[in-house]
Amino acid sequence: MWSLKAWQGRFVEPGLPAGERLRAYAGWCDAVEGNTTFYATPSRETVASWAEQTDPSFRFVPKLPRAVTHERRLGDAELRDFWHAMEPLGPRAHAYWIQLPGSFGPGDLGVLESFLRKLPVSFPYAVEVRHPGFFEAPAALEAVLERAGAEWVPFDTTAFFAAPPTSDAERDAWTKKPRMPLRTVALTGQPIVRYLGRDATSETVAGWRKWVPIVAGWLREGRSPTVFVHTPDNADAPALARRFHDEVRVLVPELEALPVPVPVEPLTLF
């Protein structure tokens, strides 16, 4: 994500080598979703470079490989190479993200429980489900996650689907993003929220307003929440994430401010 083309020259200095872009992004936000690990396990050297570019307090939420979650559906899962590659993150691995396909439903709950029992106990885990049955009767899944000390990750798409799409980016997301019920319950001390807004900043902000007091309440309870703000094209995501953080700080002034970004030099002709 930190190499997104739309961020070059805005949040990341233009022409910055790929191996330095995460460092620049970490000046804007202190957490990132690890989507790349879903498609392929990176080399240990690559992960070590991520650690080198970030402060130990920076939060990575790496996604488990799709070969494990989607192709094998948590069965016969071999993660030895994955854990070896991710080891350099150390304390930066805030949680390992187990995103399950929409076809993985309540009938598969036993498979999930068995899988969670086999995972290394030294890491925190967060599970994202997309089958509507889990939301209609959440108690069974909550019980499984609580026994494992794992979090349930809500993906709030309610604001996005509140009105028909008005741009190519919104139309593309309309066909790809799941229509998820709203869930605002935290199970652990490290709740994680994924939020999808709209192209229009005003609509994105209006949609997240319900989350501001919820996140503030978690902080007052001593929890350490992480919120990821998305839009259909993610072009403004770092600035929007900082705005959300600032709104929470109005309610919780003792919340530490995000880092001050290094100014991005504009492109010049000479």
Image (cartoon, grey):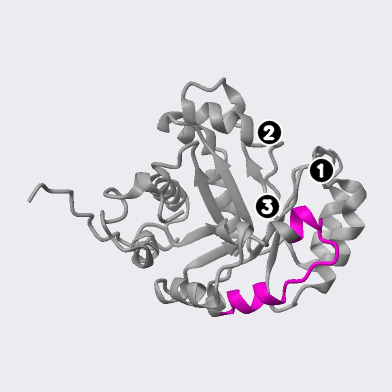
**Is 115 on the left or on the right of 42, as rendered?**
right
Q: Which residue is mark 1?
A: 103
Q: In the rendered structure, which segment of residues is drawn in magenta?
A: 68-87
> Residue 146, position in %: x, y?
80, 62
In this view of the protein, which residue sits in the foreground, 76 or 245?
A: 76
Q: Where residue 34 appears, x then y in whole percent?
A: 56, 59
Amino acid at pointer 2: Arg
Instruction: Give the number of marks.
Output: 3
Q: Residue at x 47, y 55 (%)?
A: 252
Residue 263 falls within the magenta-colored stretch: no
Please identify the quarter of the rendering in which residue 44 is found. bottom right
Q: Position of residue 90 (x, y in %)?
A: 56, 79
Amino acid marked by disc 1 = Ser
The majority secondary structure of the magenta stretch comes to: helix
Which amino acid type corresponds to the residue marked 3 in the rendered image? Answer: Val
Residue on which the image places disc 2? 179
| Relative to 84, residue 210 above or below | above
| Position above or below: 160 against 84 | above
Tell whether 65 sits left or right of 102.
Answer: left
Q: Is residue 159 visible?
A: no
Q: Is residue 255 visible?
A: yes
